[in-house]
Image (spheres, rainbow, N blue to C red):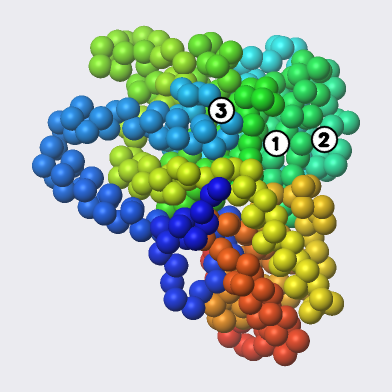
Amino acid sequence: MTDFAATRALFHLPEGVIYLDGNSLGPLPLVAEARVRQVLREQWGDQLIRAWNDSNWMALPARVGDRIARLVGAPPASVVTGDTLSIKVFQALAAALALAPPDRRVVLSDSGNFPSDLYIADGLLTALGGRELKVVAPEGVADAIDEGVAVTMLTEVDYRTGRLHDMAALTARAHAAGAVTVWDLAHSAGAIPVHLEQANADFAVGCTYKYLNGGPGSPAFIYVAPRHADHAQPILSGWLGHAEPFAFERAYRPAPGIERMRVGTPPIVALSILNAALDAWDGVDMAELRAAAIRLSETFIREVERRCATLTLASPRDPHARGSQVSFRHDHAYSVMQALIARGVIGDVRAPDILRFGFTPLYLSDAEVVQAATILADVIDTRAYEAPEFQQRAAVT
Ligand SMILES: *Cc1c(COP(=O)(O)O)cnc(C)c1O
């Protein structure tokens, strides 16, 4: 059994704070501080450039990738880390398009996808020319998969509502129509059990600063199904994806396997923090994590709904139809969240009217969830959110 009291002890959680925003930025794993000091002093400081070999820095992107692979149902040597998620979306989509039948013109996505994914697709398709991005409602995706679709580019869990796509079913449908799949796991990795290999997914990408607690701007990851890995086209053909970077050949030759999805020099300090953060997942069973997260989110919905009639659930009511977040709508969502944060309950908002809360059993207890619901109800009942200090918008919501 996963010991969630033990995992909670691995994090720095400020006194007086109930943290319901680990879906946006996970908290600091305590081990990260010592690890960073060690990397800075013993590796960079004392080993200097020798650390690329002596501390095996060059292998870190793939080693960390292997640790993430276990959490997303991927085999060893199928995941590599680096860059940001937006960049990994670009790479995956370009590689998927290169594998799709050449006469297909459509990249299919949905309106619940995160804007950066859609913007990146716009940019890539503009550069390539001759193709279009088709964006349908999330409920319409299955029916929109037809023989004109080259690639489906979908985010499994909707960042606003938490709505969960059926990855296995949509992948099967895409394959039956001859399309290639790209899955974004930004709100899945570390949140729900993911079975990339079992679902037969082609490409997947994700970030590590959300549920994986890798720290602000921590490196992203990309998965390429082993059946594609030796011929997937690395559009960002940087030297560290070359078969022999230190041969310094004029011609680019992609490395075999997943290594070709590397681009340039890896961010070793950030990767070391992520590597340390992944220690918290070592004994965690993803099915048990999911069961605990569902219990927390169901408690929250029940406790909020019996206290606040003015909040409407924006997430699917069926816990199996949503990821690990719960959203409510309120006309003054921004001010309500500011008032809530002032009382130590941290969630976030997504324009125009979504209050968003993430449920992370690694460090969140049932008692905290009940308390958060009580405080939210009080903020709304007393109209505390109407105070002038809660009306001022910050740059980051
Ligand atoms: C968080 C998130 C991003 C952010 O991309 P970055 O390049 O890391 O800033 C992109 N796509 C989705 C679906 C996300 O949830």
Image depth: mark 2 or mark 3 in front: 3
Q: How far apart are the alpha carbons under marks 2 and 3?
A: 25 Å
Position in image of residue 276 (x %, y %): 36, 46
> Mark 1 touching mark 2, by CB under 8 A?
yes
Position in image of residue 280 (x %, y %): 44, 49
Say which residue appears at 74% left-offset and 29% top-offset: 168
Q: Give me the disc on residue 141.
A: 2
Label 2 is placed on what type of residue? Val
Residue that label 3 marks: 74
Position in image of residue 160 (x %, y %): 71, 55
- Is residue 192 at all visible to an observer of this figure? yes
Q: Quadrant location of residue 122?
A: top right
Position in image of residue 318 (x %, y %): 82, 52
> Mark 2 touching mark 3, by CB under 8 A?
no
Q: Give me the disc on residue 95.
A: none
Compare marks 2 and 3 and give the one earlier in the sequence: 3
Compare marks 1 and 2 and give the one earlier in the sequence: 2
